[in-house]
Amino acid sequence: MALFTIADLHLSTTTNKPMDIFGHAWTNHAERLKTAWNELVKPEDTVVVPGDISWGMSLNEAVEDFKFINSLPGRKLIGKGNHDYWWNTVSKLNRFKEENGLDTIEFLFNNAFEADGKIVCGTRGWFPDNEYTADDEKIVLREAGRLKLSLEAGLKLRKNDEELVVFLHYPPAFASTSCSPLLEVLKEYGVKRLYYGHLHGANEALLIKSVGRTDLHLISADYLRFVPKFID
């Protein structure tokens, strides 16, 4: 078994949202993703996809994108991104999964999963578009609470001191801005590795590679050239 991750698939099987309008890097991105995924991932492996899965505005609009993901090898752990307007309650997501035969997909939602000797935890997170405000702080505090719920669930899965690996959609820190409540949770639980997406075409010099003892890794699909990243 192996663990992989990649964020920001931005699939649009049944919606008119071609991603190549954002640049040549996105040309035929779904086919490129499928090719790389099939070459790397085996049925017994797990792939964490932390957000921005489908441009569908509802579960009905997103179903073909989920069927595409379901058809790829491996178990998929899906998190929420800022563009995932189809996201719903746990019960509705699970019912949607069962009704559509999405038997390789699970949702990372105030919970945790064991994979390849590691514990997968995470939430959406948050990062301001511009200046960090009091409203941003409220959202960050809420997301920090959700991350704690996930990490506590992860601790309950531990049998032999397995590593808690965190997956967010948003970066917890970028350039000169950081979301302190989220970083405090990472420190409290001794998280060594965090993977995040959301950023596209980001200036490499502005990426924060570590905070305290936590290494931060950008895994947006275009940043990875649509090749799932192996987590050793």
Image (cartoon, rainbow, N blue to C red):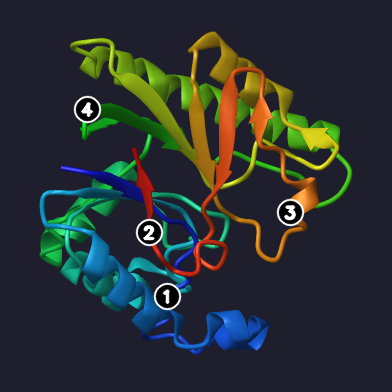
Looking at the picture, tell me which residue is in the foreground, 122 or 213. 213
Q: Mark 2 or mark 3, which is nearer the start of the sequence?
A: 3
Q: Residue at x 10, y 64 (%)?
A: 101
The residue under label 3 is which amino acid type? Glu
Q: Residue at x 84, y 38 (%)?
A: 132
Asked whether, in this view, residue 38 is left or right of residue 78, the answer is: left
* Residue 228 circle label: 2
The residue under label 4 is which amino acid type? Gly
Q: Are circles 4 and 2 on residues that touch, CB within 8 Å?
A: no
Q: CA distance from mark 4 to mark 2?
A: 19 Å
Asked whether, in this view, residue 198 is left or right of residue 74, the answer is: right
Q: CA distance from mark 1 to mark 3?
A: 25 Å
Looking at the picture, tell me which residue is in the foreground, 168 or 137. 168
Please tell me whether mark 4 sits on a helix, a strand or a loop.
loop
Residue wearing tag 4: 117
Please tell me whether mark 3 sits on a helix, a strand or a loop.
helix
Q: Mark 2 or mark 1, which is nearer the start of the sequence?
A: 1
Where residue 74 sits: x, y (%)? 17, 56
Is 212 rendered above or below residue 71?
A: above
Residue wearing tag 1: 11
Q: Mark 2 or mark 4, which is nearer the start of the sequence?
A: 4
